[in-house]
Amino acid sequence: MGKILVVIPAYNEAGTVASVVAEVRAAVPGATVLVVSDGSTDETGACAAQAGAVVLDLPINLGIGGAVQAGYRYAAQRGAGVAVRLDADGQHPAAQIPRLLERLEAGDVDMVVGSRFLEAAEEGAYRSTRLRRLGIGFYARLIGLITRRRVTDPTSGFRALNRRAILRFAERYPEDYPEPESLVYAHRLGMRVVEVPVTMSERGASTSSINAPAGVYYAIKVTIAILIDLLRSHRRRRS
């Protein structure tokens, strides 16, 4: 499988990042943990470093897509064979990273996505808001139509990638709210993507920046981006 790098994009996550780093190091003792501090104005970088992470401190805020791509570029340059991506807010369960790695290790897929909805939710498990579930359902149907594969959690950022996927995403990665668009991009590149069931937690100290108006805006923006990308791909194939 090669060297494992865990990428944790973080923006002002000083309240949770140290515990997330500690949980990752316990779950995957041999992995390098990289925290990409995306122009944070608090002590995110210092807290991550004290917890034992390598810190990539971006001078400006690039947004989630730019921060994740910076992590993949680091993984590509350092020769990582596997990159795991999870959030710094504690929502993604580090203890379940081995589940993603085990599926990736089978060798027949390029990316494994942790899904909250692949199986029935456990009693007491965290559930997103109704508005978010509607958005997730919309993306799942749209991406399913495009890829002709079942997709249950297109907004999940809890992922494990092999070397091929690392190199591709290091070259290009969507910017705003990139998870749905990256699934379509991966499909267009011929990558093999599967989901595995995971149980996620409620956010830690931070809160989501996407409220109802922002959610509608992003839904429209990402949908247009996906359709434009498909149109460009179709034109390239015809030329």
Image: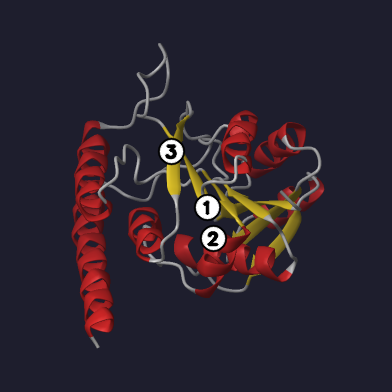
Q: Position of residue 223 (x, y in %)?
A: 21, 60
Residue for point 46% across, 47% down:
157
| Residue 123: percent from left, percent from top | 40, 11
Of the numbered discs 2 and 3, the one sitting upstream in the chain is: 2
Disc 1 packing (10 Å; few <14; some 14–19; many ≥20)? many
Residue at the disc numbered 1 = 110
Q: Earlier in the sequence, mark 2 or mark 1?
A: 1
Residue 24 coordinates in the image, percent (x, y): 69, 38
3D distance between C-alphas at marks 1 and 3? 11 Å
- Mark 1, mark 3: which one is toward the viewer? 1
Question: Mark 1 vs mark 3: which is more N-terminal?
Answer: 1
Write down the quadrant of residue 72 in the picture: bottom right
Task: Report the Cα–Cα distance between label 2 and label 1.
Answer: 6 Å
* Relative vertical location of residue 26 with respect to residue 165 in this rendering, above or below: above
The residue type indicated by label 3 comes to Glu
Decide if residue 43 is in sight here. no
Residue at image location 45% in from the left, 52% down from the top: 192
Residue under circle 3? 195
Amino acid type indicated by mark 2: Ala
- The C terminus lies in which quarter of the figure? bottom left
Residue under label 2, please give it.
165
Residues at circles 2 and 1 in contact by the CB criterion of under 8 Å: yes
Is 152 positioned to the left or the right of 156 in the image?
A: left
Structural distance between the alpha carbons of marks 2 and 3: 15 Å
Quick check: can you spot residue 181?
A: yes
Q: Secondary structure at mark 1?
A: loop
Residue 178 at x, y = what percent? 39, 59
Q: Secondary structure at mark 3?
A: strand
User: Residue at 52% of width from left, 74% of height from top?
Assistant: 171
